[in-house]
Amino acid sequence: MTAVLDSVRQWVGSAEEGVKRVLRRARARWRTVDHLGRAYIRYRDQRGDRMAAALTFYGFLSFFPLVALAFAVTGYIVAISPHARDAVAKAIDQIVPELAHRLPVDQIAAAKAGASVFALLGLAWSGLGWMGVWRESLRTIWQGAEGEGNPVVNRLRDLGVLCLLGLALLASVTLSSASSAATHAVLGWLGLADVTGAGTLLRLIALSVAVVADGLIFFILFTTLAGTKASWRHLLRGCLFGAIGFEVLKIVGALFIAHTLRNPVYASFAVIVGLLVWINLASRFILFTAAWTATRRVILAADGKRPEENGEDKKDERDEKDAEEDA
């Protein structure tokens, strides 16, 4: 029996070494793979999974107060825009795949006055706390960011970032609906509404708007919370990487969450478990995107760092031409 276990251990060890050799060769050959490897090292060394767990906890506690506050605010401006409540519902469905229709959204929306009080109290403790954890996590991933500063100013800044994120999400839903309606109207005017591929065109437009909205969210997070000295132009590639990856994550996450909801083990807790799983997946990906962006050589140069100082494999310095190409 001992001999069998030893042979299994040797086989596993040799297989692991073989995988590592393949990865090292791939990193040496392709800069894209090398960059992904450096991003993973940064994410792992800074305990990205643990920070994602903290973000999941605060995010779960903040979710319902934020939803209540959004419906309370839109409830008071419904006279200006009767479609405001529908926009909030679509925004929730956009960020929480396979779960929005299972959440008690209507009950929260109906309690406008009570929801506003509950939301404001909950937001003061959990929502701003969530943004504070996001700030600490992004600065940890970035490494060597500037100090925390005045706590009162930080709270006010976090509140402003939270409002910006909400406005960006609502704007994306409005723009997506408007662009789809306009495209459908133009196709109808041209007599092409029933032509094969028209539906695909509408879906591509909606997907493009979603990617732009996701990129804006990453841009807000990186420019306001990460503490980087890099210019906004240097951050755009990381925002695009995160936006495209987040749309892919929505598709994969929707399938995974649907499987979780059907699991009889969770029974009546399936929605809660699904929401926790989704927040955790999203938090991990956003932190990995931050690591991918922070380990770009142009970002390291802007922040006054070198790859050797951040735990990455030591390599020969590339000349200024490579740095310009990476930009």
Image: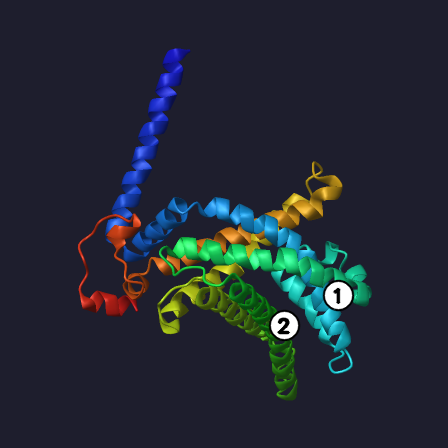
Disc 2: which residue: 170
Left or right: where 118 falls relative to 289 = right
Check disc 1 and give the amino acid type. Ser
Left or right: where 107 falls relative to 295 = right
Check disc 2 and give the amino acid type. Leu
Give the image location of residue 222, x and y in percent.
Answer: 45, 65
Give the image location of residue 294, x and y in percent.
Answer: 36, 59
Q: Say if residue 213 shows up in the picture.
A: yes
The answer for how far apart the CA atoms under marks 1 and 2 are is: 18 Å
Q: Is residue 203 above or below residue 278?
A: below
In the image shown, does 167 or 16 lie closer to the viewer? 167
Give the image location of residue 201, x and y in percent.
Answer: 56, 74
| Residue at the image position 52 percent from the left and 64 percent from the top | 154
What label does residue 116 carry, if any?
A: 1
Q: Residue furthest bottom?
A: 189
**Quadrant housing the N terminus:** top left
Question: Disc 1 vs disc 2: Cβ atoms closer than 8 Å?
Answer: no
Q: In this view, does 257 lie above or below 187?
A: above
Q: Residue furthest top?
A: 1
In the image shown, does 73 or 149 lie closer to the viewer? 149
Q: In which quarter of the image is residue 273?
A: top right
Q: In which quarter of the image is residue 158?
A: bottom right
Q: How crowded is mark 1: few (under 14 residues within 10 Å), some or many (20 or more)?
A: many
Give the image location of residue 102, x and y in percent.
Answer: 74, 54
Q: Residues within 10 Å of mark 2 (few under 14, many from 20)?
A: many
Q: Say if residue 291 shows up in the picture.
A: no
| Residue at the image position 51 percent from the left and 60 percent from the top | 246
**Quadrant housing the C terminus:** bottom left
Q: In this view, does 191 lie above or below 52?
A: below
